Image (spheres, grey):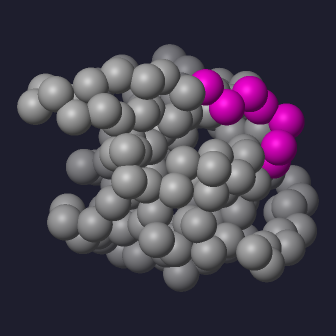
Amino acid sequence: MERIQVIPACGIGMSIHGGEWRIHASAVDECEVIEESLSWLSGGESNIIIEKENSTLGAPMQTIRVKMKSKAALSSLEILEKDSLVAMLENGVGSRVDEDKFLHIRLSLERLVQGRGVVSNNSEESVAKGKFKLEVYPGQETIEVAEDLLMRLIGK
């Protein structure tokens, strides 16, 4: 599987404390491919965690996730395609930021296993769910911090 090489953006300071990507996979999904994709997305430095469980209907499933510290989480966001980041800004990030100062991102799983970080807006497709803790200090607005982070990732 060929991966797109990404050159990290320069000058982006730490604006996130850390992050996590999580994928729910069924027994028929190609879990090894998903694991490889999460490893690529996280820079290969973070441990992949696999939790085997049953769905609410009893079918076997796995939750595959990777937790990243601030530097790895920021590098992971740098991998996302700029068009996706621009679309997130244009659509407004307010719905992607929660009261606990997390930025939520859903990536297309189909594109992720192809080596592309594309944000999904389709509620019907399989996704990798991302959750990134924003660094917000007194006097700052969480949404503005998220917008600033995305703009720096885009290079504006």
- Residue at 42% across, 33% down: 62
Is-magenta flag for residue 44?
A: yes
Residue 104: in magenta span: no
Q: Main secondary structure of the magenta part?
A: loop
Q: Position of residue 80 (x, y in %)?
A: 62, 65
Q: Nearer the viewer, residue 8 or 35?
A: 35
Q: Nearer the viewer, residue 137 or 14?
A: 14
The magenta stretch is: 43-49
Residue 6: x, y in percent?
83, 70
Examine the image and state in which quarter residue 98 appears: top left
Who's the residue at 88% across and 68% down the image? 7
Total of numbered circles in the picture?
0
* Closer to the camera in the image, 96 or 110: 110
Q: Residue 56, can we see it?
A: yes
Q: Residue at x 74, y 27 (%)?
A: 47
In the depicted view, which residue is nearer to us: 66 or 18? 66
> Can residue 4 be seen?
no
| Residue drawn at x 38%, y 53% as measured from the top left | 28
Q: Image height check: is 38 above or below 113?
A: above
Quadrant in the picture for residue 52: top left
**Left or right: 119 in relation to 83:** left
- The quadrant of the picture occupied by the C terminus is bottom right
Q: Position of residue 150 (x, y in %)?
A: 57, 59
